[in-house]
Image (spheres, grey):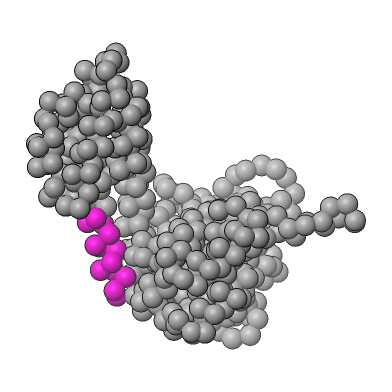
Amino acid sequence: MATGNALRSRGGDVHDGYQVFLGLDVGKDGHHAVALNRDGKRLYDAPLVNTEARLRQLFDKLVKHGAVLVVVDQPASIGALPVAVARTAGHQVAYLPGLAMRRIADLHPGRAKTDARDAFVIADAARTLPHTLRRVDVGDDTLAELEVLVGFDDDLAGEATRLSNRIRGLLTQIHPALERVLGPKAQHKAVLELLSRCGGPAGLRRAGRAKLVEIVRPKAPRMGERLVEQIFTALDEQTVTVPGTAAAEKILPKLADSLREVLQQRDEVAAGVEEMLDAHPLAEVLTSMPGIGVRTAARILLEVGDGTAFATSGHLAAYAGLAPVTRRSGTSIRGEHPPKGGNKQLKRAFFLAAFASLAHPPSRAYYDRKRAAGKRHNAALICLARRRVDVLFAMLRDRQHYQARPTDHALAA
């Protein structure tokens, strides 16, 4: 989504600054490198071992032909070392997003999917289509550290969901009424403590009301007694014992302990993410907007950076998959449809932030108006997320915190 302006570190058009366009199709053990000059002549085309010494050797060889622009298809993870070495050697680095690369590859002859062909596509796109490139910012060391933590948090979130579903599945199998009470609160500390210490329905009944209240009160002071009453009401609804209940009684405490440990790890990671965000100049700008918390702000920073890669808020919305796609063909096909592409992680972050902002009166008013117009819940949230992108883009552009006015009126209008 970035334009050539992002790569004009030497002034003028991108071709006025660079004589060599190096495309790297990165891999875990090694890469394939293709270097082209401004006329498209191949200066290098061979596999490249993923070591600092070999990377430096190639950069030193190519710089003899003029200024080098290094372009990768993944700037992080397996592409982190080439990016770091290129920066240290004083070369500008950019990357070609996967979607843009696939579309550009369709313009080249042949259907083979090889590392050599991909590296050539990257280099040729840098030479002929600089507007398809995105800048890899020089000062994003904090973001690199943040990406590691956020990636681990994503893994933990998936594991927490898996364990929660397993607990709910077991409860549904042996005691559906009890699952209806405990299932929606499976990740609550009080419920995990109950399952850990008492197991399933038989263990809960044996413990008795007084013991359960004693267990849950430290974890849920306000809802403890009510939760215990709901548990015993559910237990009284079923008198038969379903086969497999005895095994479930043994497994549920282990699942609860595992889930509790995963949630504790998420809390620790969140503290680390918050500490890193404190060091980023845009973190306070993002979190000042209603509905954007620490994890959402971290994801937006990782996917958007400082926002300068996007010319307008519409470009940002399109990148996130929030801009409607117009489809017209003659007089028979007309209308706008939700996009199927876009950055799914960024779209999810904007969607969750919009949902969290429903407690914010102007956002709620906009959402209610969309529902009154006939849109379903998710469609109304997408509309709200799209409108909030306009506000967020202006905040990043101006480095300004969220202001209740006139932005609130813009959301509610």
Instruction: Specify whether 230 is left or right of 62.
Output: left
**Count of marks, rendered view:** 0
Magenta span: predominant SS is helix
Instruction: Specify whether 336 is left or right of 76.
Output: right
Residue 382 within the segment the image draws in magenta: no
Instruction: Specify whether 123 is left or right of 330.
Output: left
Quadrant of the rendered image containing residue 193? top left
Quadrant of the rendered image containing residue 399? bottom left
- Residue at screen point 67% across, 67% down: 129
Quarter of the image with the C terminus in it: bottom right
Quarter of the image with the N terminus in it: bottom right
Q: Is residue 236 above or below residue 413?
A: above
- The answer to whether residue 19 is visible is no
- Residue at screen point 63% across, 85% down: 12
- The answer to whether residue 350 is visible is yes
Q: Is residue 228 above or below residue 7?
A: above
State the residue in front, 232 or 54. 232
- Residue at screen point 20% across, 34% down: 195
Residue 74 placement (x, y as % from top left): 49, 57
Q: Is residue 155 above or below residue 283?
A: above
Q: Which residues are magenta?
A: 267-279
Residue 101 placement (x, y as % from top left): 62, 56
State the residue in front, 21 or 221. 221
- Residue at screen point 69% across, 65% down: 40
Residue 275 within the segment the image draws in magenta: yes
